[in-house]
Image (spheres, helix red, strand yellow):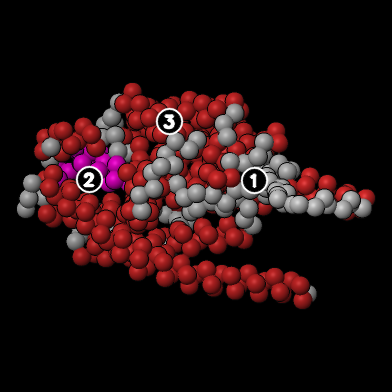
Amino acid sequence: MRGAAGESAIPVRGAGGLQQPLPPLAESDWRTGVATAERLVQPVAGAPDGKPAKAQRAGRRLYAIDGIRIAAALMVAMHHFAGTNRVNQPGNAIWGRPVSDIMPNVFRVSAYGWIGVEIFFVISGFVICMSCWGRTPRQFFVSRVIRLYPAYWFAIAFTTGVLVAVPGVWERLRPRELLLNLTMLQTGSGVANADGVYWTLWSELRFYLLFMVVVATGLTYRRVVLFCCVWGAAAMLAPVSKFPLLLLVANPEGAWYFIAGLALYLMHRFGQDLLLWGILAMAWLMGQMELGQRIDEVEHVSSWRGAVLIFTVFLLVMVGVALGMTDRVQWKWLVTAGTMTYPLYLMHYAAGTTMINRLRDTMDPRLLVVAVIAGFLVLSYLVHRFVERPVAGLLKRGLDTSFARLRNAGNAS
């Protein structure tokens, strides 16, 4: 998930300390030298208004992003364990009674944890743009497959195993539905998710498919800005059009969060300007509306004002990251924490709430939530170390070989 190093103008240095005058240049040599110097000081392709890229910042690892990602994952986990409307109902299958009665202070804080999903979407827009810069569609496709599927396949197997071993909390899918879940395309086929949190993957996949169009044309400042504007317009028109295909493609529930991430990365790579601030402001305005709709229609546990405040603070922090204000944050442990985010998100919900159901009478509920989250953090590290990394390597080698064969077959024909 790291971006390619940015390009910048290369200074031309002359030799110093010469004691003898240089011989005069022939006209052809002079013209060659001028042409070379002009090439060296040309602005970076795709930079707005000819301004050079922020090369040093664009090539660095952003440790702060890793920290925000793990914080968002922990927010979501806390929400699912102690802050949802489901766990606050009398006789719920997880705690047995309203969690606001068991630990009221934890419930009030955890009720806002669902915003971690929106934070994920913004970060996804940022890091996808960063990691795809200078890549081909084939490289983009391979990077997404090896990033998404190894941990996802393990999570399906793990969650299914837990639900089989400890029945009664969640209903298991039929075998044919579980098998279809392995594709990550089950929502498009009208099949339920093996774990409820997988709904976000459907939004991510649609974003990737749309963004691949821009990757295929070559990422530049202008093309990404145009993509943001066109996608944003489609997302605004889709709900009133009531056209199913436009709703599916435009993804109005998630579009503006991804667009915010794209605008923030352009700020990071090229510097801020009024156009990017305008896109980010529009994303905030559309985002606050979506937050309110989600509270009214899904969450029912938090206030609009609190949700908007958290989202606004997050966007301001991301602006700080984009403009280099967090470059001094270089704690190595954040890299490890960031790698645990995806497995943690995939595995914690159904399996974690099932474990809470079985252990809720054995210890203090606050200690139980902390223990379950700690256990999933350890498991997530192990999954990254012993599943994601080796399987991703195998998949990459296999896909690279397959694409090489396709290319050679095309040349041969």
Q: Residue at x 60, y 72 (%)?
A: 402
Q: Secondary structure at mark 1?
A: loop
Instruction: Indicate the position of residue 299 as horizontal and vertical percent values.
Output: 31, 35
Q: Secondary structure at mark 3?
A: helix
Q: Which mark is residue 8?
A: 1
Q: Could you tell which of marks 3 and 1 lies nearer the N-terminus?
A: 1
Distance between mark 1 and mark 2 Cα atoms: 48 Å
Distance between mark 3 and mark 1 Cα atoms: 27 Å
Report which residue position mark 3 lands on. 316
Q: Amino acid at mark 2?
A: Phe
Q: Which circle, 3 or 2, is nearer the viewer?
A: 3
Residue, far top:
305
Q: Which circle, 3 or 1, is nearer the viewer?
A: 1
Instruction: Indicate the position of residue 152 as horizontal and vertical percent values.
Output: 39, 60
Q: Nearer the viewer, residue 82 or 223?
A: 223
Instruction: Indicate the position of residue 354 as horizontal and vertical percent values.
Output: 20, 54
Distance between mark 3 and mark 2 Cα atoms: 28 Å
Q: Could you tell which of marks 1 and 2 lies nearer the N-terminus?
A: 1
Q: Which residues are magenta?
A: 73-95
Residue 292 lies, with reference to residue 340, above or below; the image says: above
Q: Residues within 10 Å of mark 1 (few under 14, many from 20)?
A: some
Query: Residue 159 sits in which quadrant?
Result: bottom left
Is 75 inside the magenta-drawn segment?
Answer: yes
Instruction: Indicate the position of residue 255 as horizontal and vertical percent values.
Output: 51, 38
Q: Secondary structure at mark 2?
A: helix
Q: Nearer the viewer, residue 388 or 23?
A: 23
Q: Could you tell which of marks 3 and 2 lies nearer the N-terminus?
A: 2
Report which residue position mark 2 lands on. 81
Q: Nearer the viewer, residue 320 or 365?
A: 320
